[in-house]
Image: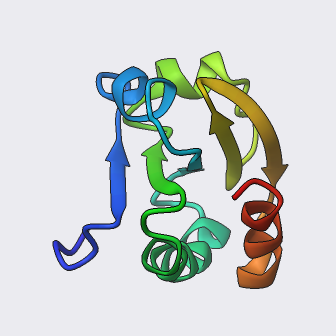
Amino acid sequence: MASSYMALVELTDQNFKKEVLQAELPVFVDFFALWCSPCLMAEPVIKELAEEYEGKIKIGKLNVDENPKTAQKYGIMSIPTVIIFQEGKEVKKQIGFLGKEGYKKLIEEIV
């Protein structure tokens, strides 16, 4: 992750509760893996969205291989999966790469 993308939060099993469940803003979480080609296609789109929506919604990525506890807790079976959390609760879940417009639509329903 390049440090120029401050808007994008790297999530882990350790910081998930603080960064997502206790966040004041809604949180868009991209569950991904480095070997997943649709996940790699989604990455630049998610970085753009993190910048566009900064201050409105927090956007983070969670590597399912490195953080299996959180992925398992939310029933992540296929990736990429996006879950939007609000006030610590799962409010939207989408499996598969939607493209920028698809992700924007999900975000717009929340913010």
When the figure is inspected, residue 9 is found, relative to residue 6, above or below; the finding is above
When the figure is inspected, residue 108 is found, relative to residue 9, above or below; the finding is below
Q: In terms of depth relative to the viewer, which is nearer, 55 or 76?
A: 55
When the figure is inspected, residue 92 is found, relative to residue 14, above or below; the finding is below
Extreme residue in the left direction: 3
Residue at 51%, 60% in the rendered image: 35
Residue at 60%, 27% in the rendered image: 87
> Which of the 4 image quadrants contains residue 106?
bottom right
Q: In terms of depth relative to the viewer, which is nearer, 90 or 14?
A: 90
Q: In terms of depth relative to the viewer, which is nearer, 88 or 2?
A: 88
User: x, y percentage for residue 65?
Assistant: 45, 38
User: x, y percentage for residue 44?
Assistant: 49, 82
> Which of the 4 image quadrants contains residue 23?
top left
User: x, y percentage for residue 88?
Assistant: 59, 23
The reply, left or right, for residue 101 in relation to residue 71 is right
The reply, left or right, for residue 88 in relation to residue 68 is right
Quadrant the C terminus occupies: bottom right
The reply, left or right, for residue 43 in relation to residue 83 is left
Q: How is the image coloured?
A: rainbow
User: x, y percentage for residue 101?
Assistant: 79, 83
